[in-house]
Image: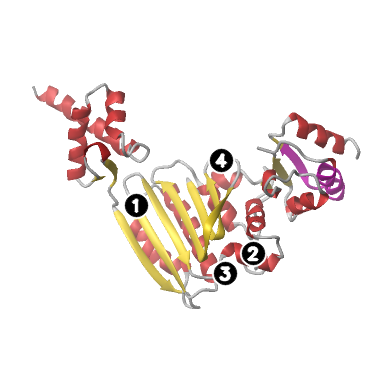
Amino acid sequence: MRRQMTKVRSRGEQIRRFIVSHVQEHPTDIAKFTAGHFGITRQAVNKHLQQLVEECALVSDGKTRNRAYRLYPLVQWLKEHELNDSLAEDIVWRSDVEPSLGMLPENVFEIWHYGFTEMFNNAIDHAKGSSVEVLLRKNAAVTELAIIDNGIGIFRKIQSELGLMDERHAILELSKGKLTTDPANHTGEGIFFTSRMFDAFDIVSGGVAFSHTFGDAEDWILERARPESGTMVWMKLNNHTSRTIRKVFDQFTSDDEFGFTKTVVPVRRAQYGNDKLVSRSQAKRLLARVDRFKTVIFDFTEVDYIGQAFADEVFRVFASRHPEVELIAMKANPSVKRMIQRATSST
């Protein structure tokens, strides 16, 4: 009898662990999803859901058919800081963020340390606002953190100080890496590497948003209907990811180099609206600052066509002027490949 009770208890714990692991992706149908996985009834799953709610592992909203479940926040707070000369990212990290993260694996803890201090320092040095808020929310599966300032807006500042076309152009430059408006004090690597360490990373400012999801080959530009002042940086990471800072850095470092030597450039970000990539001016915009890298990978995802002048400017003119830079075309369709081959054969 004791062995049978132990087996039943173990089965119940297995079911509840499954629920906690999958409820974020299935908030409204977690009972059906779990029942199908274990071959049990929804009524049986509902007993486990009720137990998880009573244990404060889950929170339920709505009634009966409209009921949804989400993980109970273990930690949740919002703190505001005055932006002044005495504010320092390491102090806020030690006093507020580090204690709230709790017992996390060392690699996860290191990612949060790097990401928070880099992004909070950006607000201190560049926002030119009066205040910055930090929002932290942690549950059993993931931790999210947002840094929100009331300054001039990151994309607007980059556009203004570097003389770019618009805020979308600023995001194109951010996606390459090594972009800073203060080269004496910053390398321009913080946003690039931070965006690639987290499961999800967003910067929202003005009329656009920069978004990167881990595993995606490129960054995304999202239009916003109502421009607002200031900047919000949002980061999300699984509490038990196996990712490490070193693995992320190694992706963009040559085998015999220690610096940031590789970059992936999303070519379609040089397009505006329905424009085709045909002109030398478009190519020059794409090529801005890529001579700072040893290897440049041009990602032609969703680029149907490039013109002769565009291809010539990138793969013949620039290549001949910068033989020390290796240019690689990735995910190019047959039409794009023909234009590239035509340009390279003219060298």
- Quickly name the residue at label 4: 216
Asked whether 95 falls inside the magenta stretch, the response is no
- Quickly name the residue at label 1: 138
Sequence-wise, the earlier of marks 2 and 4 is 2
| Local secondary structure at mark 3 | helix
> Label 3: few (<14), some or many (≥20) within 10 Å?
some
Q: Quadrant of the N terminus?
A: top left
- Residue 318: % across, % down: 83, 48
- Residue 182: % across, % down: 65, 68
The answer to the question of whether label 4 and label 3 lie on touching residues, with beta carbons closer than 8 A, is no
Sequence-wise, the earlier of marks 1 and 3 is 3
Horizontal side of 12 relative to 275 (left or right) equals left
Horizontal side of 45 relative to 283 (left or right) equals left
- Magenta span: predominant SS is helix
The answer to the question of whether label 1 and label 4 lie on touching residues, with beta carbons closer than 8 A, is no
- Quickly name the residue at label 2: 158
> Label 2: few (<14), some or many (≥20) within 10 Å?
many
Please state which of residues 106 and 68 is positioned toward the viewer in this rendering.
68
Sequence-wise, the earlier of marks 1 and 4 is 1
Distance in Å between CA atoms under marks 1 and 4: 24 Å
Q: Which mark is residue 126?
A: 3
Amino acid type assigned to the residue bearing label 1 in the image: Lys
| Local secondary structure at mark 4 | loop
> Label 1: few (<14), some or many (≥20) within 10 Å?
many
